[in-house]
Image: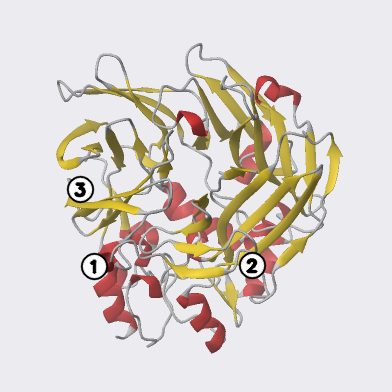
Amino acid sequence: MNRRTALQAFGALSATFAAPSFALPADASAFDRAVAANRWLQPFKGISDTTQDLRCESLAITGRWPAGLRGRFYRNGPALFERGGQRYRHWFDGDGMVQQFRFGDGRVSHLGRLVHTPKLLAEQRAGRFLYSAFGTDIPSDAPAQGPDSFNTANTNAIEHAGRVLAMWEGGSAFALDPRDLSTQGPVSWRDDLQQAPFSAHPKVDASGHLWNIGTFRNRVIAWHIDPQGRFVNAQVGESPYPGGMVHDMAVTAQFLVIPLPPVKLHFERLAAGGTPEQAYEFQRDEPLRILVLRKDDITQRRVFELPAQMVFHVGNAYERGDGSIALSFVGASDHRSLVLGAVAVMRGQPAPPRVSSTQLAVLDMASGRASVESLADAVEFPRVDPRRIGLPTRYLLNASTWMPYAAGRGSLFHGIELRDLHSGKVDRYDYGEQMVVEEHLIVPKPGASDELDAWLVGTTFDAQRQVTLVNVLEARRVAAGPVAQAALPYWLPLGFHGNFTPA
């Protein structure tokens, strides 16, 4: 199967298999020259050695590390952007690298390893890129054996039932050993669904069950995995918006809640070498659809319509007393972060300003009507107390931007905010002009039940020192800043998502 045939055959499974070609600097030296004036973009250089792990047995700690904060903190994101002088042109293209920080006994250690997917191993042997990606066309006749030939496993990592799952949009999850992050291989939940999309944002409910979706062509798969990691069910249904981009989902006690933003992928434009801006069309005359499926029978469903918005990430969803569903998510007025921002940073240029904000929707299951309230913030990467997934939640944590100096860095963040959804109060912390802020998590304190009895844990990149830090804040006193920081002696590529496993 040659390159073009493979893209036609597997591209419909997920937008992630698209391969536009466009005139941007594609060599490493061009990026190096561009980033010299923008030191905060250094992590987009990515790693250069594809065989060497990143290790630090003892990070330098400042402040007082909480004695009760013990466990494994995972991050995942694109990390390998260059081979043989050629450079990927879109942030989403890079091969995935899982970061594991171990907390315990007042010490923090770090291990970072590339996920050894078939794509990575084949390209290591060849010494060059072989497979086209989301935003970069790679001329090659390398054979493809299915979606996992393109799988970068670069979007999220979660430890579940004794193994770490490294996940992407359009193919298998890859299992890693939590002891050393060695790649065990793709996970096949059912023989007839090998390489079927197992998306990057599964949700683990209060009882430990893992729920996920996958989309391909006009189909939606609903996955159910039990707390012991055993396959329970996979249901396949129709999508009300075929060929669109679906990234995240929420769960409630009874339902799966899936935003379907009006972004259409035009394969004919990709085949002709179109840019992401040309190929990924934001259809302003189409609504944002919210697909609600019953967990036990996805043929029982409702489709709600809201004004057109781009949606990457949801916060949470839960069923209210009147039977309606409350849903929080981050929405944007267009898809510029997808087609412009993620391209600009790979050239060493500022991305367009952040335009996404918190959205609070109510879905009336009886009438089929929906309403939404847009909040005045500029945020992304929403997270809630993991014990409250699918249940009523009061607090929503986001990476955020609000200071004037942030305009020069485009859509990258400088702070975090914890929003009280009952009172509207926002507790913020600004890490400062030299910092790039990544996703933070809410980590409940052992034995605690209140949502604010928690730590906020997340990574930042210090552009001045050129190092990555792990930060710990008190959820009750966000504005006071970190109570402890653990600094690596090196920087890490900026990641997307991760999770925490208590020890």
Closer to the camera in the image, 25 or 195: 195
Q: In which quadrant is the N terminus drawn? A: bottom left
- Compared with 210, 419 (above or below) is above
Give the SS element for disc 3: loop
Q: Is residue 398 left or right of residue 38?
A: left
**Dot 2 corresponds to which residue?**
31
Q: Are marks 1 and 2 in contact (CB under 8 Å)?
A: no
Question: On the image, which quarter does residue 255 sit in?
Answer: top left
Which badge, 3 or 2, comes first in the chain's sequence?
2
Local crowd size for mark 1, using a 10 Å CA cut-off: few (<14), some (14–19), many (≥20)? few
Residue located at (59% from left, 37% from top): 441
Q: State whether residue 201 appears in this view.
A: yes
Q: Position of residue 23 (x, y in %)?
A: 47, 70
Give the mark, 3 or 1, whose residue is nearer the N terminus: 1
The residue to which callout 3 is attached is 241
Specify whether 394 is left or right of 439: left
Residue 70, how many percent across, how many down?
70, 41
Q: Which mark is residue 192?
A: 1
Mark 3 or 2, which is nearer the eye? Answer: 3
| Disc 3 residue crowd, few under 14, some 14–19, many 20+, Cα 10 Å | many
Tell me, yes or no, whether the two marked residues, 3 and 2, touch with CB atoms within 8 Å: no
Please identify the quarter of the rendering in which residue 284 is found: top left
Along the viewing direction, whichever of 73 and 85 lies nearer the viewer: 73
User: CB atoms at circles 3 and 1 under 8 Å apart?
Assistant: no
The label nearer to you, 1 versus 2, is: 1
Dot 2 amino acid type: Phe
| Residue pictured at 52% horizontal, 50% vertical | 158
